[in-house]
């Protein structure tokens, strides 16, 4: 069982102490998990150099060294400090009893290996790497060797996604039991490389009883897909009202509306300029045009969901403002819809409808009065605080998109790739989320399911076409296929 929730380090400590499994057994399981990752990564015969700290993370390293020796693999070990925790002492003595000797000179053994296993610090680390640990971290990072981190790259802080001043940069991380903030979200995740979640024997009942801070399990979200009835019609899955596009940005309207249709919406009404509607009608004859200068026209059609902002410029700010004040239909606010309300705090307070806002980091920075760098340094914190303060479900886009709800719900997405780094991808995402809303999916579920499907679609396209060739216009259809075929 692999638990894809996110936990704080205090919860991991309680789980370790109260799970009913002997702690030495947990450590042996951790060593077995590290061995399994080395095998998956084809590193077992590469010459393995384990760097151990003095505590239980170092104990994992000593236990791994014993396991490698027993199975006939070439292994060497360096102790940054003498072991001090009882389990580290136990497995250090076992390693020495097998003829293992700690390397006297770090640099010599580092030069003679191809794979480094970082077992200096795990989830309980705080502060900064100093002294010998700082020296070792710099040498490992500069060596160019393949690095596997045990639980966390040493120097990372488990309970935040912030990047520390100095830490190990790993090629892979075998994190134990479940995700930490640092393994789930950028920028800290960038130091983890490929993340493996290892079951080390914590009973499922203990995991289920522990308070999780968030979730990363996109596959589980597929259970939230809207059901379709044989006895249904277009109105059963809509309509969706989309205020999108303008004379120059008709592509944004097309991408959003097409994605909405491709993921199940029964009817999409596009409110935009005449030129935009004519262009979209050629590409997407299914869409119905509407006049973008009348609040009553939009609301009298009784839309089941609204999509506001994709490529519409600032010409419809007044209409967006009035819609936000009057509508009670769940609404996705994207792009220029976000720019419309940036700096206008009164609009946040007057919204009646369930609201999903989908900013990229620059838009988020304008909303909260920070720099883009400040937003990206603490993505989870930024999104959760905004959601809590203003009552919007917040989708902070980017690598590991964060979805936060006002009641504390948190989802950190793990699907997707840099093939999404193209103009139009965000319009498709907004269309998918709005489509799910129009089909009756609850707002927080629609936001996180939409984000997951969007990323999964990109992952599928990369396997078929490669990362350079992914086109935003293909994402909606691929997402629809995933909804049906899984």
Image (cartoon, grey):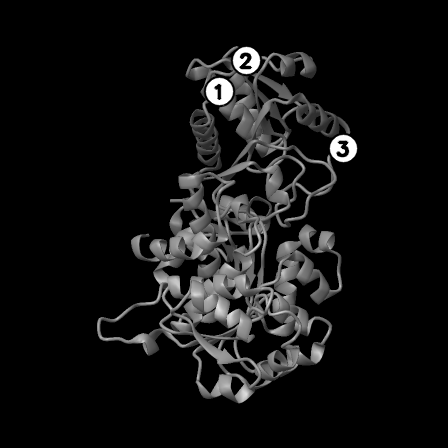
| Pointer 2 with pointer 1, Cβ within 8 A | yes
Above or below for 182 versus 131: below
Q: Would you identify the image quadrant in which residue 319 lies?
A: bottom right
Q: Which residue is mark 2?
A: 100
The answer, for residue 213, to whether it is visible in the render is no
How far is the residue under mark 2 from the one under mark 1?
Answer: 8 Å
- What residue appears at the point 59 percent right and 68 percent down from the top-left corner? 247
Q: CA distance from mark 3 to mark 1?
A: 28 Å
Q: Position of residue 63 (x, y in %)?
A: 50, 25
What SS does tag 3 mark?
Answer: loop
* Farthest left residue in view: 230
Height in image: 108 above or below 482? above
Describe residue 230's horizontal placement relative to residue 260 as left or right: left
Mark 2 to mark 3 CA distance (whole Å): 27 Å
- Residue at the (48%, 64%) spot, across then down: 254
From the viewer's perspective, is residue 207 above or below residue 436?
Answer: above
Q: Which residue is mark 3?
A: 130
- First in sequence, mark 2 or 3: give its number: 2
Q: Which residue is mark 1?
A: 66
């Amino acid at each position: 069982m692999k638990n894809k929730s996110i936990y704080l380090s205090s919860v991991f400590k309680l789980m370790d102490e109260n799970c009913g499994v002997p702690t030495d057994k947990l450590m042996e399981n951790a060593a077995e998990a590290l061995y399994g990752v080395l095998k998956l990564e084809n590193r077992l015969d590469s010459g393995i150099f384990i760097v151990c700290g003095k505590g239980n993370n170092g104990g994992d390293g000593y236990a791994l060294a014993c396991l490698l020796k027993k199975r006939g693999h070439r292994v060497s070990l360096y102790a940054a400090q003498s072991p001090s925790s009882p389990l580290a002492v136990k497995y250090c003595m076992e390693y020495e009893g097998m003829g293992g000797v700690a390397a006297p000179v770090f640099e010599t053994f580092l030069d003679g290996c191809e794979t480094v296993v970082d077992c200096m610090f795990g989830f309980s680390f705080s502060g900064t790497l100093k002294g010998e640990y700082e020296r070792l971290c710099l040498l490992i990072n500069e060596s160019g060797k393949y690095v596997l981190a045990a639980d966390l790259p040493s120097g990372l802080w488990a309970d935040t996604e912030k990047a520390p001043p100095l830490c190990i940069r790993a090629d892979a991380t075998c994190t134990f039991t479940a995700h930490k903030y640092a393994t789930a979200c950028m920028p800290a995740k960038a130091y983890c490389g490929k993340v493996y979640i290892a079951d080390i024997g914590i009973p499922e009942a203990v995991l289920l009883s522990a308070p999780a801070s968030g979730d990363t399990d996109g596959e589980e979200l597929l259970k939230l897909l809207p059901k379709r009835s044989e006895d249904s019609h277009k109105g059963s899955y809509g309509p969706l009202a989309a205020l999108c596009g303008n004379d120059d940005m008709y592509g944004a309207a097309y991408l959003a509306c097409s994605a909405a249709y491709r993921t199940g919406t029964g009817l999409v009404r596009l409110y935009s300029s005449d030129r935009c509607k004519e262009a979209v009608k050629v590409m997407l004859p299914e869409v119905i045009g509407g006049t973008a200068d009348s609040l009553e026209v939009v609301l009298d059609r009784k839309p089941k969901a609204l999509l506001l902002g994709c490529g519409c410029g600032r010409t419809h700010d007044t209409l967006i403002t009035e819609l936000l004040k009057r509508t009670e239909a769940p609404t996705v606010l994207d792009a220029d819809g976000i720019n419309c309300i940036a700096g206008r705090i009164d609009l946040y307070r007057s919204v009646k409808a369930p609201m999903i806002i989908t900013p990229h980091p620059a838009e988020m920075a304008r909303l909260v009065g920070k720099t883009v760098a400040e937003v990206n340094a603490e993505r989870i914190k930024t999104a959760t605080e905004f959601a809590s303060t203003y009552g919007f479900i917040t989708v902070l886009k980017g690598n590991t998109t964060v979805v936060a709800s006002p009641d504390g719900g948190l989802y950190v997405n793990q699907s997707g790739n840099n093939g999404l780094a193209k103009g139009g991808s965000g319009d498709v995402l907004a269309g998918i989320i709005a489509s799910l809303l129009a089909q009756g999916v609850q707002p927080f579920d629609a936001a996180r399911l939409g984000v997951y499907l969007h990323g999964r679609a990109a992952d599928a396209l990369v396997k078929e076409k490669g990362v350079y060739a992914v086109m935003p216009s293909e994402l909606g259809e691929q997402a629809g296929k995933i909804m049906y075929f899984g």
